[in-house]
Amino acid sequence: MLQLTDKTNEQIISVSAYKRKETIRNYATAALFLAPFMVLYIWFWIYPIIQGFITSLTTGSYGVEQNFVGLSNYAYMLTDNKFWVSFGNTLYFILISTPTIVVLGLIMALIVNSKLKGTTILRSAFFMPYMLSISVVGSIWVFILQSRTGLLAETFQLFGYTMEISWFGSWGMGWLSILIATLWWTVGFNMILFLAGLQEIPEEIYEAADIDGASSWEKFRYITFPSLRGVTALVILLQTIASFKLFGQTFLITNGGPGISTTPLVHYIYQVAFRQWDMGYASAISFVLFLVISLIAFIQYKVLMKKD
């Protein structure tokens, strides 16, 4: 009996050792496959963040000896009026662009997901601007919105309207121009995300709602919209992050003006880094922007995905 117990214990120890070796082998295999990606990830994502933070603690520029100044760049940021104006401009653009693009993307997805004729053409037409580069998008909208010689002004003149609209001459019209260009350029991508979410909803749920006599609005309110909660959270998150990185539209369409009224934070970082050649301060602003985006993305994810 005693010999049988010892033999059972040996078998248990042997099985445990085998499982441990198997686990180690699986981890080693996973690490081997992940290694190429991790090397690139560390080199192109982690290292620039660390290097950017180190640069933010210095002064100087390209070809000039850099001096360590501690947190002086961050202290200066607190008193820099241009930084706060550009930060406010960025938040303002997020407030006006995110709801607009999300709602319009959902409406467009509902249209192309319907069984009407011509939706395939509409789907391509809505998504096509997203394939253009920002330089092309900026050039197109400058060509359209020029106050005297633009396509819109020329079209108005054909119908007898000679009133000039200064699209880039004021704070409000400048932001409206940037918002229109951004909508035209990016809403197609959000439409595709919503469309994928709509096609994941089982058709049987709508058929059951039809049997119960539900109206189109009731089906949208109680079936479609709740089913798209995860996609909506993703779209809001991506759109918010994209709006924080606003640069090309303001640089090409309004050049940040008039004054700095349409200068967002990334545009201001560009001016500090490549106009004033102050890489230390530009890195400090960039690092703060990185922290703000990370914090807002984390909060949004926790709040919007809470019910899931």
Image (tube, grey):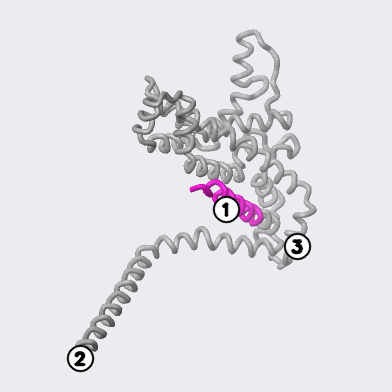
Labels 3 and 1: the sequence-earlier one: 3
Determine whether 248 is above or below 276 in the image.
above
Taking the spot 71% from the left edge, 68% from the top edge, the residue there is 68
Magenta stretch bounds? 286-308
Which residue type does callout 2 highlight?
Gln
Determine whether 155 is above or below 182 in the image.
above
Labels 3 and 2: the sequence-earlier one: 2
- Say which mark, if any, is on residue 271: none
Res 161 → quadrant: top right
| Residue 30 at x, y percent in the picture | 35, 65
Depth order, front residue of 27/168 = 27
* Disc 1: which residue: 298
| Residue 228 at x, y percent in the picture | 47, 38
Q: Is residue 1 left or right of residue 117?
A: left
Which mark is in front, 3 or 1? 1
Dot 1 falls on a residue whose secondary structure is helix
Which mark is in front, 3 or 2? 2
- Say which mark, if any, is on residue 3: 2
Taking the spot 67% from the left edge, 22% from the top edge, the residue there is 147
| Residue 145 at x, y percent in the picture | 63, 24
- Say which mark, if any, is on residue 72: 3
| Residue 171 at x, y percent in the picture | 73, 32
Visible in this render: residue 272? yes
| Gap in angstroms between the C-alphas marked 2 and 1 | 59 Å
Which residue type does callout 3 highlight?
Ser
| Gap in angstroms between the C-alphas marked 3 and 1 | 28 Å
Q: Quadrant of the N terminus?
A: bottom left
Depth order, front residue of 63/125 = 125
Residue furthest out toward the top: 160
Which residue type does callout 1 highlight?
Phe
